[in-house]
Image: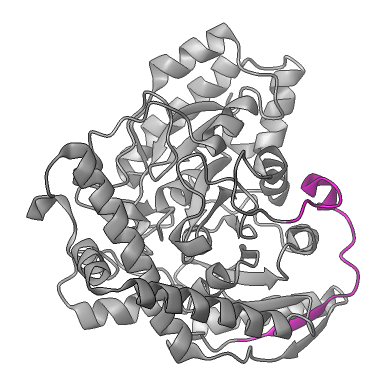
């Protein structure tokens, strides 16, 4: 297919369904595109070409995306018999013996899963740089971060390797790379997609899984294919009133929208990011929505202190689980310096610290929810900074103070909504004078992806980004 990368996943699936193309032709196109651009990007790893060709020959399930090429993120998404390194030398030999529930749903949807995308170690950084896989480059400019931790996924979608790719988000890891790479990325509501069977939740409920995509409708359709609790899930989001795909193109009505351009953690916001958010607000006014400037009132210091013990405890548990599997401790060169710091922090925390952290996070959620009784949607920059150079967000950066400042700039608008569990999306509406994408974040009420998808589709029609491509 000469025009493979001009189609979204829904369009490719329709071509397969109507027998205009065969699934193997799409796989050939995806692999050719990978061969052409991946040496520059370093976004795709652990190809499983022989296995997926065998699956196509046997017959993929007749799901909504039957025959569409797809990539899994190299983090937590277990696939039976396939490597899962979590971006770390300490996990490089891990091969799960079963599919995670999310991967099982991807398989039932008929996807042709042909490899994985890069992730930083344990998804801990808002960039995709690791000792194991190296640096994943931004398709818009070599040497610039693609964001993280789903930076490989976002780079692969932006570069046309696949129209949509699996991604996860514990502090902004879908929205940050979507912003950096100029694609669409929605973090769904807490509990919307399954975490089982090996976990009930990630990072105390702050982590969520979904995709990054070129089109809004693909994101909605993938949510339809994967949403809902798996057996024994500890909690789940309320079922939608109708399929999410039906929200795309539906009128959002006249929305009450707030605009905030000061970060939630005190990080200064770059003028390019302020400009992007204000331009999006102006566009929303032009579309008939009511927009006013307002700031969410919540205790920033308490929230910031609460997240560290929760994440630290989760990292400590993850490393110790691997220690039990291998029967030995990690060597110094098997974990990044930043991972060691979080692991050691976890070891200093008490059970009471963890419980108090969760309490503070829940209290923050109540404060933020009260704000959304006044507004349907909040607009902010997706990040407080344009995409940064490689090294500045690396887990091995020696200047810890500078590293923390840059991480705060990357996550200054995203991590709050991981804690509150609300859906939030980065929409590619702006590029700066350097030609780099600057995403705009839209957050909605808990459980209300529907409103965000209606608005996103309206924005996509008003300011289409689909044909804006990096010149790799």
Q: Is residue 432 above or below residue 202?
A: below
Is there any visible trace of residue 9 in the rendered image? yes
Q: Residue furthest left?
A: 332
Q: Residue furthest front?
A: 352
Q: Give the magenta range.
A: 238-260
Is there any visible trace of residue 270 in the rendered image? no
Q: Is residue 251 above or below residue 89?
A: below
Which quadrant holds the N terminus? top right
Q: Nearer the viewer, residue 1 or 213?
A: 213
Q: Residue at x 11, y 44 (%)?
A: 328
Q: Residue at x 64, y 67 (%)?
A: 422
Q: Nearer the viewer, residue 183 or 347?
A: 347
Q: Main secondary structure of the magenta part?
A: loop
- Quarter of the image for residue 427 reads bottom right
Residue 338 drawn at (x, y percent): 22, 66
Residue 158 drawn at (x, y percent): 51, 49
Residue 383 drawn at (x, y percent): 49, 74
Q: Nearer the viewer, residue 215 or 337?
A: 337
Q: Nearer the viewer, residue 269 or 413?
A: 413
Residue 88 drawn at (x, y percent): 24, 47
- Quarter of the image for residue 324 reads top left
* Residue 97 sits inside the magenta stretch: no
Q: Residue at x 79, y 82 (%)?
A: 373
């Amino acid at each position: 297919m000469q025009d493979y990368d001009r189609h979204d996943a829904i369009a490719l699936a329709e071509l397969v369904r109507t027998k205009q193309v065969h699934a193997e032709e799409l796989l050939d196109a995806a692999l050719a595109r990978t061969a052409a651009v991946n040496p520059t990007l370093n976004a795709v790893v652990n190809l499983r070409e022989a296995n997926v060709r065998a699956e196509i020959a046997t017959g993929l399930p007749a799901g909504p995306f039957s025959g569409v090429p797809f990539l899994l993120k190299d983090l937590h998404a277990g696939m039976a018999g396939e490597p899962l390194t979590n971006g770390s030398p300490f996990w490089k030999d891990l091969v799960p013996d079963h599919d995670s529930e999310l991967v099982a749903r991807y398989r039932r949807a008929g996807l042709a899963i042909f490899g994985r995308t890069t992730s930083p170690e344990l998804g801990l950084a808002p960039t995709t740089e690791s000792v194991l896989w190296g640096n994943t480059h931004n398709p818009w400019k070599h040497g610039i971060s693609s964001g993280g931790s789903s930076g490989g996924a976002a780079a692969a979608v932006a570069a046309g390797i696949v129209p949509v790719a699996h991604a996860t988000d514990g502090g902004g890891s879908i929205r940050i790379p979507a912003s950096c790479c100029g694609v669409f990325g929605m973090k769904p509501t807490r509990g919307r997609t399954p975490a089982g069977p090996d976990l009930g939740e990630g990072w105390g409920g702050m982590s969520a899984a979904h995709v990054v995509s070129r089109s809004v409708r693909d994101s909605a359709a993938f949510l339809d294919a994967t949403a809902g609790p798996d057996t024994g899930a500890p909690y789940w989001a309320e079922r939608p009133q109708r399929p999410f795909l039906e929200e795309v193109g539906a009128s959002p009505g006249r929305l009450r929208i707030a605009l905030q351009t000061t970060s939630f953690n005190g990080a200064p916001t770059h003028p390019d990011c302020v400009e992007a958010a204000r331009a999006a607000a102006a566009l929303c006014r032009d579309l008939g929505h009511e927009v006013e400037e307002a700031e969410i009132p919540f205790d920033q210091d308490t929230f910031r202190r609460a997240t560290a013990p929760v994440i630290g405890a989760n990292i400590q548990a993850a490393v110790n689980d691997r220690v039990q599997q291998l029967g030995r401790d990690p060597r110094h060169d098997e974990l990044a310096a930043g991972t060691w710091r979080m692991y050691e922090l976890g070891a200093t925390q008490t059970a009471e610290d963890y419980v108090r952290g969760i309490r503070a996070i829940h209290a923050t959620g109540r404060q933020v929810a009260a704000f959304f009784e006044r507004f349907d949607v909040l607009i902010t920059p997706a990040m407080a900074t344009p995409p940064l150079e490689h090294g500045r967000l690396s887990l091995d950066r020696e200047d810890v103070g500078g590293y923390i400042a840059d991480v705060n700039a990357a996550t200054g608008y995203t991590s709050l909504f991981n804690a509150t569990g609300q859906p939030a999306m980065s929409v590619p509406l702006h590029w700066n004078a350097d030609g780099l994408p600057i995403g705009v974040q839209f957050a909605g009420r808990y459980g209300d992806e529907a409103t965000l998808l209606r608005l996103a589709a309206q924005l996509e029609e008003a300011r289409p980004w689909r044909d804006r491509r990096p010149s790799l």
